[in-house]
Image (tube, helix red, strand yellow):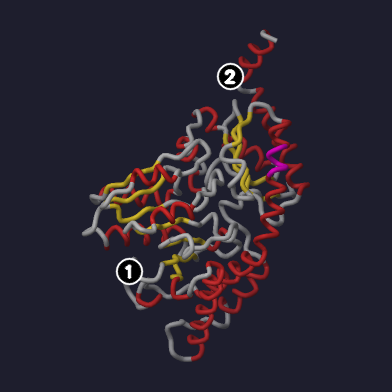
Amino acid sequence: MNRMIYLDNAATTRITDEVLACMLPFLKDSYGNPSSIYDLGANNKDALSEARKKIAGVLSCEPQNIFFTSGGTESDNWALIGTAESRAHQGKHLITSKIEHHAVIHTCQYLEKRGFEITYLDVDEQGFVKKETLMNALRPDTVMVSIMTANNEIGTIQPIAELGELLKNHPAYFHTDAVQAFGQIPIKPEEWHIDMLSASSHKFHGPKGAGFLYVRDGIRLPSFLHGGKQERGQRAGTENVAAIVGMGKAAEIAAQTMGVRDERERALRDYMISRIEKEIPYCHLNGPRRNRLANNVNISFSFVEGETLVVLLDMEGICCSGGSACTSGQVAVSHVLKAIHLEPETARGALRFTLNEETTKADIDYTIDRLKEVLDESRRMNSSYRSFIGINQRHS
């Protein structure tokens, strides 16, 4: 199979040629430690400052609000654990939602074992956190609320501005995991009353191993990694200069192209959903039709296992996912699909396709044509499907 159609951009994205080109000098010739005072190191320190400015520009904040990390997972851990430990004297209650990424869910479970109380908010059947639900969960001893900007599985874009407005007069810090959203939609931390925001480079065509945590002025988290004085004494460890430079460039490009990409991907997404719903029976769109990431298609197919379809489509040169990349290979139903109250049989048949700016209409047509073939074959082998069809035929 020579043809390869990549439709798993929520899992990771390809580094663009422009991003790679700006990284290469720092992987070879400009290898100095940015903490050094001689030119070879000082020049790299300047490169880090430039990358910080580019990312801050995307968020309309100051460079001093951006702290470099190894990725979204570290940023989430730092925000939640740092807040919980530093504010434990004020309260030991945190709030999150039932559809967060495991980087948040598992960190909250870690905190529960250490004496903190976590409220996991219900969401509606499209994956939205309601303002009233959050308001009812808030307590005087709540020290943090963490709600993701957009869901990595079903694409739901949360009303972060509304939730931030609700929280602006409450002492709890407001954190958002924006790993799927950064570079896809405009985000305004100061205007939306966001105290902390996590993002990861490899989700917007930057390299793996780099990310950042936005921290609002006036908040000082305890160091998460201990050692040197990097990141203004907040995050120890020699900086991954090449990756950070690449992340800065990728962020700059994402901001410049966001509007055009959104319009194009949204049209392809809606075309894909429309074709599938018209041509494939017994399917169910997971997540909302509006307020959804422009590149996200998540659909369940009855009478088949999603993971089986992933393997069969891979044999046809199509890369997609049965859920988030962090749960691939597991038979268990996605916690996100459970939270939106899908029946287990429907949830197990879920496929996630995530597009990018290089995806074409021909790619979508090829994918749907192959999907119909492998789905028909899989269903014919399913005894429940054969019984279902037989019963319907007898009653028609």
Mark 2 Cα shell of 10 Å, populated few (<14), some (14-19), many (≥20): some
Look at 32% across and 74% down and name the residue there. Answer: 227
Q: Which mark is residue 123?
A: none
Residue 223's mark? Answer: 1
Image coordinates for residue 304, horizontal then vertical, percent: 59, 29
Residue 331 makes an appearance in the image: no
Which amino acid does the dot numbered 1 rest on? Ser
Instruction: Answer with mark 1 or mark 2, whichever residue precedes in sequence.
Output: 1
Across and down, in percent, residue 158 comes to: 50, 49
Q: Quadrant of residue 183?
A: bottom right
Q: Residues within 10 Å of mark 1 (few under 14, many from 20)?
A: some
Q: Which residues are magenta?
A: 270-274
- Residue found farthest to the top: 394
Res. 387 visible in picture: yes
Label 2 belongs to which residue? Answer: 384
Residue 223 vertical position relative to residue 160 in the rendered view, above or below: below
> Position of 172 compared to 65: left or right?
left
